[in-house]
Image (spheres, rainbow, N blue to C red):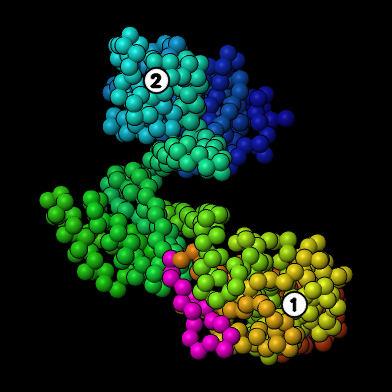
Amino acid sequence: MVDTVSYRPKAGEIPTQPGVYRFRDASGRVLYVGKAKNLRARLSNYFAPLASLHERTRRMVTSANSVEWTVVGTEFEALQLEFTWIKEFDPPFNVQFRDDKSYPYLAITLGETVPRVMVTRNKNIKGARYFGPYTKVWAIRETVDLMLKAFPMRSCSDATYKRAEQTGRPCLLGDIGKCAAPCVKRVSQEEHKSIALDFASFMAGQDMRYVSDLNKRMRQAAAVQDYESAARTRDQIVALETVLSKNSVVLADSVDADIFGIAHDELAAAVQQFIVRGGRIRGVRSWVVDKELDLELADLVESVLQNAYEEEAVPPKQIIVPVLPEDAAELEHWLASVKWNRTGNSGRVTLRVAQRGDVAALAQTVDHNARNALVLYKTRRSGDFTARSQALADIQEALGMTQAPLRMECYDVSHLGGTNIVASMVVFEDGLPRKDQYRRFSIPNSTDDTESIYQTLSRRLAHFDGELEASASLELEPTQPAGATGGPPSKRFAYRPNLLIVDGGQPQVAAAARAMQDAGVTGIQLCGIAKRLEEIWLPDSEYPVILPRNSDALFLIQRIRDEAHRFAITYQRQRRKKDIGSVLADIPGLGPARVRDLLKHFGSVTKLRAAAPEQITEVRGIGATLAVTIHRALRE
C-alpha cells in the first residue's frame, strides 16, 4: 500500500476529460479548486506518496477528507467554472485574486416569498442564488430578457410589486407575458416559486431537459390543434436554445463573424447562421429554402447571403461559408456597400472557407446543425396531415389517376461494379412509410439496371392477389422477421398498390412496364423519378411530367425514392461484408488475380479465414506485410 491519503479514488473512476475538481474537509468546506485538461492525469499527482509532495500540497491533501470533480466540454469552460467556484467558495489553498473589481452577478432571491431575478453586484442577499460572475452587465440583462420568455418570473422592484398588488393591475412585463404576475393572483405564490426554481435549475446546469420537455408539450398541443399554446411553447424553446448558444465562448475576443452552414437536397435547403461577436455566439438564425431551381452549393451560398442581409442585418468583417461562389469578389463588394449604407462605417467584408482551427471546428458544428434542421424539416413536413393529403391529391391529378395513390411502392437497385446486385421495395400508405412491409431482393445475375428492375418487378408482381409461388431465379429476403430467408411472404405482400415508382428515367420505366405486361398486371399506375432534374416519367411518354419544385407532391415522391435508395444501399453493404471476394478486393495491393490465387490455394473461405499470416505468405505474390493486412481484414 502506497503512503497516501485514505480517500484516494481508484484511477479508473476518474475521467480523462477536461474538468474542475474540489478538495473538501470533513465539514464539507471547499479547501481547493483546480482545473485540468485531463482530470485523471492531474489528480494522480496529488495522490503520489506523501513524502514526494511539496509541503503545501501535502498539507492540503492531508487536511482534506474527500475530492470531487465536474466534467466540462472544453478547457475554456473549465477555466470559467474554476474562476466561478474560487469566487464563490473562497478556498484557503487557492491563490487569492487581488483584483478588487466587483463583478456583476445574476441573482435569484429564492429566500423571498415571491422570488425575484435581478442583476446585482451585492453578494450578501440572504437566501439568494447567484450565477456568474459576468464581465458585462448588458450580457446578463440580454440573457435575463430571453429567459423570462421561458420562465416568466418576477423581475420588478419591491415598490413596483407592491403598487401592482394595491391597484390590481400588473406592470408591462405581466401584460407582454414576461412575468406570470403573482402580484394580481394570475398564478399562486407556490406556482411562481416553482417557476423561479426552474429558472435557477436551468441556469445552474444549462439543462436540455427543459428544452426536451417543452418540445413534448409543443407536440402535444399541436396534436390537439391547440396552436396558440404550441406557438407560445415554441417561442419558449427558441429562447432557451438562444441562451444555451449565447453562453458558449468559442473564439478569440477580437473575432466578429457570421458562420453559415447549408444542407440541401434537390428540393430544399436548410440554413444555419451563427452570429459571433467578440468571440461569443450572440445569436443563431435558421431558415429553410424551397429550391425552385436545381442550384449547386456555390450558387446557393450567394442566394443565402443575399437573403440574410437584404433587410436590416449588418455584415461583419468575416463571413464563413461552406464554399466560395464564383463571383465572391463582387459579393464582397456588395456586402461592404450594405455595411456602409447601414452603419456609415467603411471596411472590407471578407468571404472565406474555414480550413483549420477553432473557426473550422465551429463551422462543422454549424453544418451539423443545418443537416439536422433539414432532416427535421422533411420529417415534420411529411408528418403534416394536410400536406400529405394535398400531396396525394396533386399526384393523382398530375399522373391522371382515377383515385389518390393511398398505397405506393418504390423500387431501387444497388450494386458495386456489377457485383452484389440487390434491390429494395419500400411501401408508403397514406403518405407515411410502412417499414414492416419493406422488402429486399437479391439478384444473382443481371446485365444492367433495367434488367435488374425487370427481374425485381417480375418477382413482385407474381405475388399479387395471393399468388405466392416462389421464383427459383430470384431470392426474396423479407425484412421481417430479421434475417429471414425462406417461408412464404406475409399476406400484406399480396396487396396491390395504387402506384408503382421506380428510381430512374425512361429506360427503367420501360423495363418495369415490360414486367407488368409479361405478368398480365393492369390497373396500376407506373412512373419513374429521374435524379437531379426530378422529372416524373410515365410509360410510353415522350415528355416528362414536371411538378413544381416546392410542391408537396414532388416532396412526397422524392422522399419515397430516397427511402428506397437508403434501404437498397444498406442491404447491399450488408451483403458486401459477407462476400469475402469484395472484402479482399478492398485491400490495397490485391487484384483479381491474387484474389483468385488465394481462394484456389486454401480451397475454401473457412480455411482462408483461419489461416495465419505465415500461411498466407505461401501464396505466390503475397509478402509478409500484405499477409498481415489480409489476416487483419478477414478477422475484422
55 in the magenta segment: no
User: Relative to 57, does residue 491 appear above or below in the rendering?
Assistant: below
Tell me, yes or no, if residue 621 can be seen here.
no
Label 1 is placed on what type of residue? Arg
- Asked if the residue under mark 1 is in contact with the one under mark 2, i.e. CB atoms within 8 Å, the reply is no
Judge the density around disc 1: few (<14), some (14-19), many (≥20) Cα neighbours within 10 Å: many
Residue 470 appears left or right of 81: right
Q: What residue type is labelled 2?
A: Ala
Q: Nearer the viewer, residue 463 or 248?
A: 463
Where does the N terminus fall, quadrant-wise?
A: top right
| Residue lying at 42% horizontally and 39% vertically, measured from the top left | 235
Q: Can residue 514 be seen in this view?
A: yes
In this view, which residue lies farthest toward the front? 402
Tell me residue 429's x, y (percent): 65, 62
**Label ID, residue 181:** 2
On the image, the x and y values in percent for residue 185 come to: 43, 15
Distance from the alpha carbon under mark 2 to that under mark 1? 65 Å
Q: Name the residue under label 1.
A: 460
Q: In this view, does 522 lie to the left or right of 26?
A: right
Q: Is residue 536 magenta?
A: yes
Q: What stretch is highlighted in magenta?
A: 534-550
Where residue 55 appears, as percent x and y from the top left, is 52, 24
Q: How many marks?
A: 2
Image quadrant occupied by the C terminus: bottom right
Q: What element carries label 1?
A: helix
Q: Main secondary structure of the magenta part?
A: loop
Q: Residues within 10 Å of mark 2 (few under 14, many from 20)?
A: many
Quadrant of res 64: top right
Farthest residue to the left: give it.
Answer: 344
Q: Where is residue 238 in the image (x, y as percent from the top left)?
A: 42, 41
Q: Nearer the viewer, residue 452 or 501?
A: 501
Residue 168, located in which quarter of the rendered image? top left
